[in-house]
Image (cartoon, grey):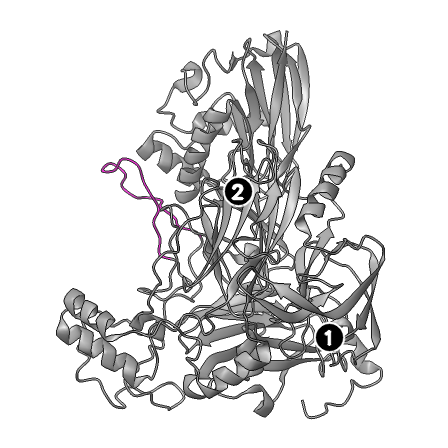
Amino acid sequence: MRFKFVKEAATVVAIAASIPVFATAAVAAGSHGGGAEIGTPGAVSETTRTIEVKMYDNFYEPETIDIREGETIRFVIKNEGELVHEFNIGTATGHAAHQEEMMMMVEHGVLEADRINWNAAKKMQASMGHGAHDDPNSTLLEPGQSGEVVWTFPEHATLEFACNVPGHYDAGMMGEINLTH
Amino acid sequence: MKSLMSPRAKLLGAALAFALSAAAPAWAETYNLTVDRIEIDTGDFTKTGIGFNGASPGPVLRFKEGEDVTIKVKNNLPEATSIHWHGLILPYQQDGVPMISYDGIAPGETFTYKFPIVQNGTYWFHSHSGFQEPDGAYGSIIIDAKGREPYRYDREYVIQLTDAHPHSGDRIMRNLKMMPDYYNRKQRTLFDFLDDAQDKGLDAALADRRAWGEMRMMPTDIEDLQGFTALMNGKGPDQNWTGLFKPGERVRLRFINSSAMTYFDVRIPGLKMTVVQADGNNVQPVTVDEFRIAVAETYDVIVRPKEDKAFTVFAESMGRTAFARGTLAPREGMVADVPALRNDPLLTMADMGMAHEGMDHSGMSGAEHSMPNGKTMSGAMKHGDMAGGHSMEKGMSMEGMDHSAHGGMKMEQADPFYAPGSGLAPAAANGGKFLSYADLKAQKPRYEDREATREIELRLTGNMERYIWSIDGIKYADADPIRLQFGERVRFKFINETMMSHPMHLHGMWSIIDNGNGARDPIKHVVSVAPGTTVYMETEVDAEGQWAFHCHLSYHADSGMFRKVVVEGGPGDKQAALTPESGK
C-alpha cells in the first residue's frame, strides 16, 4: 500500500515549517544546512537559472551539474521513482555523516522505503533534536512529490549532490557538482 | 529512461576478459556449448573432471533481456549429461532436469535449447546429471537489463565459488553412505571434552556430551564434506584470481556460489560492500561488511576502492575448514594480506530446535517429549513455536522510545533466521554489519502483494546414520509429487528438523521469502533454512509443467531431499497431456 501524494513544493515547505524545530541550524556550519564551505541558502530573487533534477530508483538525471562559482541556482526536484529519495548538496564527508543520520531515521520508523512517517519524524525531532529533515540544502521527497532548493554556491569547493537514504549513495545515487570560475 | 552504453561497454569487454577463466564469452544469439572431460588443477591437487567448452568453470554466457536464445549443447562425455539454467524462468521442457524436463542428453548427442529471456541479472548454469556439477560442470550467466539498472558501476566481475574435492562425486556419495562422518575431520576428542569441563564444569560437559551422543550426532557437523579446495573462478587460493580496478571506480562483483556442499562467508578487508541484487533480483541497496552465501545463491555487490592498493576477496567456508581467495588490485601482481581462518563454530542445542538454558540434562533421557507427528526422539525436544521464522513486525519501530538516557545508538539485533542461541549465527570478522535475510527488500516487487491461497508444510528431515536426507521423512524415490494449481499462491512452511542448513531450490518459479516486508519481501530462487528454524516463502504458481524442488546440497539431493512439483490447470493442460510419468 502506498500513499501517492502530489504535493506542491509550497505545501512541502509548509509541512516542514509546522514541525517543531529545535535545531535552528539554517546557516550554521557543519553538515546541517550550510557554512561557507558548501555555500549558503539563496534568495529566489537572485537566482541566475533554474535546474531541473529528476530522481529515479536509484539515480539522478542529470548525472553531473556544472555551476559557476557564486551562482545562485534554483533546483526544481521531482521524485519520479517508487522509493523515497533525497537531493542534498554537500561534501563527500558531509554526506557520509548525513547517511548516519538517515540510518537513524530508518531505525526510528521515520523513513520507510516509499514514504515518510511525519508523526515519527516529530517524535524523533522532539527527543533527539533532529529527524525532521528540514535543512535548506536538501529536500527529501516521497514518490511523486516535488521540492525546491535555492542555493548560492561558494568558490573553490568540491561538492556533490547526493541521496543519503541508506544504501543509495553507495549504489551510485550521487553526482559531481563542477564549479568553474 | 536513458541507458548508459558505449563507454561502459568497452570497460565491460576488458573486464570480462579478466573474469573468464579460459573460454571466450558467447556473444552471438546462438550459443554453443560442449560438455567435455577435462583436467582440473586446483593448486592443491589435480583430477579429471568435467567442463564446458573445455574449461571449469565454463564460459560466462551473456544474454539480453527480451531476446530469444538458442543454445546448442554437444555431449562429448561417455555418459548422459544435462544442463539446467539455474534461476531462469522458461518453459519447463527447457529446464534441463532429466526425467522431469526431458530425457537428458545422450553421449555424442547435441540438444538444442530455445527459450525467451524474460529477466535480467546474475545467474548460473550446471549439469543436473549425477555428480557432474561437483566434478566441474558449472558456468555463469549474465543477463543485461532492457532498461536502466537502479545502480551505477564502472566495471564488473563474476566471482564464482566452488568446493573442488580430490575425490569424484560418485566416490564421495559412496563414502558418505558407508560412513556419514567419513569427511568430517573435526571429531571432538577427549582433549576437547576436558576443555569443555574446564569451561562449563564437569556436569554440564558430561550432560552436553550425553545429549549429543544420544542423538548420534557430532556437534561439529556443520560441513558434511571437508578436505576440499575452495576455488574462486576456477583458481585455488595460491593461484589467486585477480580483478583489476582504477581507484575511485565502482566495481560490481557478481558472486555465485556453485559449490556442491559449502556455504561461504565473504568479506573484502578494507572495503564495504553494497548489496544490490540477490538471486538475480534487485534489492534496496544495503551496505555490509560481510555476507554468507548459501550453496546455489548469488549476491551482486558494488564496491568502491578508492586507494591505490590491493584488497583480498576472502570467502571463508562456514565450517571454517577452507577458504577461497582472490584479489582486487590496481595492477597485476599486487597482493594484500590474507586473513587466517577463524575458529570453527560449534552447533548448540538451540540449533536442534531447543533452547536449553538452565535445563537439567541428566533427567532427560528417554521419550519425554513427543513430536507433532507422534514420533519421539530420545533426548530431543521440539518446540512447536520456534522463533526465527514467524512473520515479523515491519522493521524496527522505535517510536515513543525514551532517548534521554543514551548517547549513540547502535542497533544490534540477532539474526532472526537463526535459532536464538545458535552456534551458526554469523558475525562479521571486523565487528561490523553482517547481512541477514531480514535486510533484503525487493527494489521492485514482481507480483501484487496478496494473501496465499493455501499453505504447504515441508519438514526437512534426515537420518544421519544412513546418510538419508528427506522431506517429511520420505525420500524422493518413495514420494508422491507435490501438486500445485496454476494461478494459486502457495505459502511453503519449511521446518528444519535437522542440524544442517539446507538451501531449498524450487525450479521455474520464484520463492518470495516472508521476512516481514510485505509487498517488498525479497524474491529469490534459493531459500536457506538454518537448523532448528522455520522459514516461510511464497510462490505465485504461474509456470505450468513439472519442476524439480530440492535441497541444493548435492549429496542431500541425491540421497532423497528432492521432490517433483506438478503444476496443474494451466493453459497447456487443455492440449496434449503431459508425458506420462515413468517411475518418477
Q: What element does badge 2 sit on?
A: loop
Determine the image quadrant of residue B384: bottom left
Disc 1 is attached to a residue of which chain? B
Along the viewing direction, whichever of A55 and B440 lies nearer the viewer: B440
Q: In which quarter of the image is the N terminus of chain B?
A: top right
Q: How far apart are marks 1 and 2 (CA)?
A: 47 Å
Give the answer, above or below, for where B92 lies relative to B418.
Answer: below
Q: Which residue lies at the image location 29% right of the left edge and 79% below the top edge?
A: B212
Determine the image quadrant of residue B562: bottom right
Q: Is residue A84 magenta?
A: no
Q: What element does badge 1 sit on?
A: loop
Query: Which secondary structure class fits the magenta region best?
Result: loop
Residue B363 location (% of width, % of height): 17, 85
Residue B228 vs residue B34: left or right?
Answer: left
Along the viewing direction, whichever of A150 and B193 lies nearer the viewer: B193
Is residue A49 in view from this perspective? yes
Disc 2 is attached to a residue of which chain? A
Residue B104 location (% of width, % of height): 76, 79
Label 1 amino acid?
Ser
Where are the magenta residues, as a range?
Answer: B395-414
- Which residue is labeled 1 in the image? B82
Q: Does the magenta stretch include residue B397?
A: yes
Q: Which residue lies at the image location 39% right of the left edge and 48% below the top edge?
A: B397
- Which residue is labeled 2 in the image? A115
